[in-house]
Amino acid sequence: MARYLHTMLRITDVEASRAFYEALGMEFRRDLPIVRNGELEATNYFFGFPGQDEELELTFNHDGRSYELGTAYGHIAIGADDLDATLARLAAEGIEPERPPYQVREGGAFIAFVRDPDSYRIELIELGSDPRRGS
């Protein structure tokens, strides 16, 4: 039987990324150094929401390279019990939404987007409605 395990994003600032994802409510679970030919090539940092097995893997490559997001990446969606409270908590950490919460269609869930330190878009969906109703 197959099951979803994780999504990986490449990051350029470990501390800024950790602070961002912890501000979203994720917990740091573990790191995994990647050593090849005796040299530290990368480190994987795993985060998840309490009570959930699925994880977000943040990969930091130690060679100093930079990345382009490309045009295929869209966003990661995260459910929020109270979107206004979540946005207020994030604002206290200096994280602002791209625009105020809105509905994609009448009767749909309220959503807002924030960006992580590497400009990955994160969609926050208020869970008062079915979270699959976001964009």
Image (cartoon, rainbow, N blue to C red):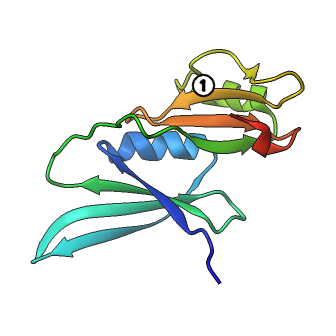
Image quarter of the C terminus = top right
Give the percent coordinates (x, y) of residue 85.
76, 29
Q: What residue do we see at 42% from left, 43% from top? A: 17
Q: What residue do we see at 15% from left, 46% from top? A: 64
Local crowd size for mark 1, using a 10 Å CA cut-off: few (<14), some (14–19), many (≥20) = few
Tell me the quarter of the picture where residue 131 sits: top right
What element does badge 1 sit on?
A: helix
**Viewed as shown, does residue 92 lie left or right of 72?**
right
Q: What residue do we see at 62% from left, 15% from top? A: 99
**Viewed as shown, does residue 14 lie left or right of 107?**
left
Label 1 sits on what residue type?
Ala
Identify whether 39 is placed above or below 27: below
Give the percent coordinates (x, y) of residue 93.
55, 29
- Residue placed under numbered mark 1 in the picture: 92
Tell me the quarter of the picture where residue 27 sits: bottom right
Image quarter of the N terminus = bottom right
- Most distant residue in the bottom direction: 1
- Most distant residue in the front direction: 72
Tell me the quarter of the picture where residue 72 sits: top left
Identify whether 108 is placed above or below 42: above
Give the percent coordinates (x, y) of residue 113.
60, 28
Count of numbered badges drawn on the protein = 1
Identify whether 92 is placed above or below 75: above
Q: Nearer the viewer, residue 101 or 20?
A: 101
Q: What residue do we see at 71% from left, 32% from top? A: 86
**Viewed as shown, does residue 106 lie left or right of 111?**
right
